[in-house]
Amino acid sequence: MTTPSIVVKGLHVTRQGQEVLSDLNFQVAAGEVFALLGGNGAGKSTTLLTCIGMLKPSAGSVTICGHSAADEPEAVRRSLAYLSETASLYEHLSARENLRYFLELAGTKPDPVAIEQALDTVSLQADARDRRSAGFSKGMRQKVAIALALLRKTPVLLLDEPTSGLDPVAVEEFNRLLITLCQRDVAILMVTHDLFGACEVSSRIGLLRDGHLVNQFEASRDVNGKLIHVDVNEVKRSFAGREAA
Amino acid sequence: MSLIRNIQREARFVGANRTTLAACLALAIMCLLAIVLGQAEISRQNDTLERTLSQSRVELGEVFDAATDYGGAAYSGFSLTYNAPAEAAFLAIGQRDLSPWMLRIRALALEGQIHESDNFNPELSLAGRFDYAFVIAFVLPLFIIVLLYDVYAAERDAGRVAMLTATAARPGRVWLARVLVLASGAALACLLPLWLLGLVFGAGAGNLLSVTAVVLANVVFWTLVTCALAFGRWAASVNAAVLTGIWLVLALLVPLAGKIMIDRTVPGVDGARISLLQRETVNGAWDLPKAATMEPFYASHPEWAHSAPIDEPFHWKWYYAFQQMGDEAAEPLSRAYREAIRERDALTGQVAWLSPPVAVLRAIQNIAETDMASALEYEMRIRDYHAQIRHFFYPLLFEEVPFERKNLEGFPVFSAR
């Protein structure tokens, strides 16, 4: 593993008097997709919110590209892009206008040529780019959000349930985009329910239950360096076994 | 990123939202309409004044020309008093809907003349007036609520708060800039029509600056109230319901409770009672010996005590003496009436501390000089002028100066402010 872009160390997070994350430890390196898999209430979204500085750890730390999420939130936010489950865009703005708005929000000067290239990369239809995003499908909204991540050139991407509600074709396109981002050395932390999707794109999978990371699985590479996916059945067995326990 | 750049970005963002623009446009149109309607009413009052004033002068001249004695000239000679609208009166019609702003008076007892219109049905006090002050006091808060109630909750419900937080270097500035832009939109929608039409209608820069300060204070107050809820944990629909409730309490319930409290604390004097007492005294004097009028009159006005005794069955100086005695009999009640109005007005001022819409209404009426103080000041000017008329005629009547038309030339003229 190269130098980790995301380091979560001994993380404890308490919300409304209840410990949601307990002694969570993992790292994500540049060019790697780490999927946190777990059921409802396992602490997946809490992990992401702590990474972007919206929640403060009660103990432990989150470090993004060498910056502490708790102490250097501005530096951390400059280093990451976040894609929410709903991939909500502003409906009164077009795809291009949304990108311009969020780029300005991030303090990046919008470059029209770069915006076109990013929209080309995510394959958003040309006729949709100037249309108000009110009628966009979730897949289209996600493409715009990924385009934003590409434009911001952040070394870290956080994804919250990115494939929920997507049709199989859209999932395939989305996975292709993730691979593109990995090739650009982006470290991706993805939280998801989707076991199959996670196994398909992730370099590593962590199994999260009741705020604890209970198991990790790592994809291997063949002699040609090609990724051999994590075995779905292995993860399923582990998940089922823990569930039974 | 500087706050200015945040504001520029949010201004472009808000400017692209048709719903927000439509709300601001609707508010601006309401302000324009309110100012135009206010100006139409003030123009109507000015036209009436101008017409009546010139007619009144002609009529008074005709009465004096036809007069054969001073008493008859004083009896038939009506003079117009008026409370000319101040230059910003079109912004708040205020008491000009409820209290007289024009009154023809003559040398007879004054109290009945002042209070004769008190029993008119004050239907306008129920309906209220759609003027600029009304829009700013009662409508503007609703627009601010509409613009801001979901400024945060809508983002949270759409799942964008985390994305905004993760994207903006300093998320607090994003919210601050957005709130500033939206509140400024509401303020501009009110202030642009004010300055545009205010200058055209000659309101005066000083008045416009004062009204601008009131508008901005109102915008700041309702923005803070709305944001206090909008950035809480409640859903947007709950925010809207609670904020509407707050508006109802501050704009309707507090003023209503205040009025009930004021009515109980300071019941006030019925103007018709003053009129009745004065007329009873005047009418009763016809049946009394003249000495019953003249002795107390000379006692309170010793400067005329040397006047020749009255031998005739009727003499104008006796007639005007019992008119004055009628006023003096009603004076305690009249003073109590004015004191009650002042006290009620002062209590309303205290209620305004609990009801910002009432405070805003009063502040703009004060600038427009259409408040209760202005109405009372006009009443006092009527009293002063009536005293001048009496002082003009009394030497002619009590000294029994032979009638000559030229002696009426110095008849006092009511001076406008």
Image (cartoon, rainbow, N blue to C red):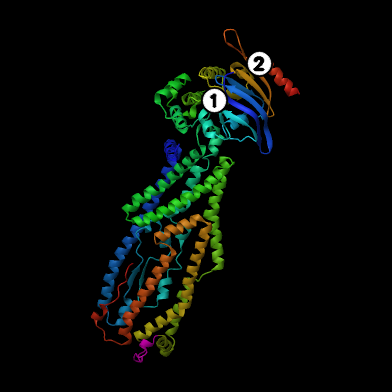
Q: Residue at x 62, y 29 (%)?
A: A47
Q: Nearer the viewer, residue B36 or B201?
A: B201
Image location (x, y in percent) of residue A142: 52, 24
Identify residue type, mark 1.
Answer: Leu
Q: CA distance from mark 2 to mark 1?
A: 24 Å
Give the number of the disc on residue A80: none
Q: Which residues are magenta?
A: B301-314
Give the number of the disc on residue A232: 2
State the residue lying farthest toward the right: A245
* Same subunit: marks 2 and 1: yes
Main SS category, magenta section: loop
Asked if residue B54 is among those painted magenta in the image, a careful observer would answer: no
Q: Residue at x 73, y 23 (%)?
A: A243
Q: Nearer the viewer, residue A1 or B125?
A: A1
Image location (x, y in percent) of residue A149: 50, 25
Can residue B130 be spotted in the picture? no
Label 2: how many residues lie within 10 Å, few (<14), some (14-19) or many (20+)? some
Q: Residue at x 35, y 55 (%)?
A: B39
A134 vs B367, left or right, is right
- Element type at mark 1: strand
Identify residue type, mark 2.
Answer: Val
Q: Chain of mark 2?
A: A
- Examine the rendered structure and indicate whether residue B231 appears above or below residue A81: below
Q: List the residue tagged with mark 1.
A: A157
